[in-house]
Image (cartoon, rainbow, N blue to C red):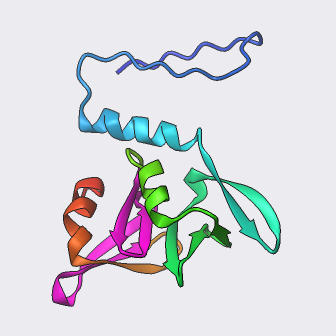
């Protein structure tokens, strides 16, 4: 793989161009990472609207029809529904792991088989999330063990 970087003061917007013969899984994951840095979501905390970069989000969780956005040290509310976020985050490191949760696989540090066919994930911030049986296959495809 070759990496070419051209820097110029005349450039207004960063452009990333990938030229390849075959798009393998490693290249797809690299593209997913690049896409993360170009998007953000709006979160609400204490009446303040805040843009949150996707790469800063650990996971989304739903409680009583309210969607919460979890970062390393804050919890925001979202005006989006979980299914809307799932659609928006297609082809990204995010994957749905239960009816009420979408996790950023970049922050998963370990997985452990759990009783009754579930998987327990541990995130970088030491939070533990359960992958329900229905979502295990998709999680395994996204999170390479």
Left-right relation of 24 to 28 = left
Location of residue 31 with respect to 125 vertically, above or below: above
Location of residue 78 with respect to 3 vertically, above or below: below
Left-right relation of 15 to 52 = left
Part of the protein shown in magenta: 93-122
Taking the view exactly as shown, the residue that stands out farthest to the bottom is: 115
Let me know if residue 127 is in the magenta part.
Answer: no
Q: Residue at x 71, y 14 (%)?
A: 11
Let me know if residue 111 is in the magenta part.
Answer: yes
Q: Residue at x 49, y 57 (%)?
A: 85
Q: Position of residue 125 (x, y in %)?
A: 53, 73
Q: Position of residue 79 (x, y in %)?
A: 63, 64
Dominant secondary structure of the residues highlighted in magenta in the image: strand
Q: Nearer the viewer, residue 34 or 5?
A: 34
Left-right relation of 65 to 135 = right
Q: Residue at x 61, y 67 (%)?
A: 71
Q: Nearer the viewer, residue 32 or 9?
A: 32
Location of residue 58 with respect to 3 vertically, above or below: below
One can see residue 134 in this view: yes
Q: Quadrant of the C terminus?
A: bottom left
Taking the view exactly as shown, the residue that stands out farthest to the right is: 47
Q: Residue at x 45, y 20 (%)?
A: 3
Q: Position of residue 21 (x, y in %)?
A: 25, 16
Q: Position of residue 28 (x, y in %)?
A: 33, 36
């Amino acid at each position: 793989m070759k990496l070419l970087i051209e820097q110029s003061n005349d450039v207004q917007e960063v452009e990333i161009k990938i030229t390849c013969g075959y798009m393998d899984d490693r290249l797809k994951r690299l593209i997913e990472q690049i896409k993360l840095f170009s998007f953000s979501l709006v979160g609400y905390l204490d009446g303040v609207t805040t843009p949150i970069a996707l790469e800063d989000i650990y996971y989304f969780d739903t409680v009583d029809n309210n969607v919460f956005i979890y970062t390393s040290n804050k919890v925001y509310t979202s005006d989006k529904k979980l299914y809307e976020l799932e659609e928006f985050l297609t082809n990204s490191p995010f994957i749905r792991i239960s009816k009420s949760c979408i996790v950023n696989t970049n922050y998963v540090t370990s997985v452990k088989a759990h009783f009754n066919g579930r998987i327990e994930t541990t995130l970088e911030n030491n939070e533990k999330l359960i992958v329900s049986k229905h979502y295990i296959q998709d999680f395994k495809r996204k999170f390479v063990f």
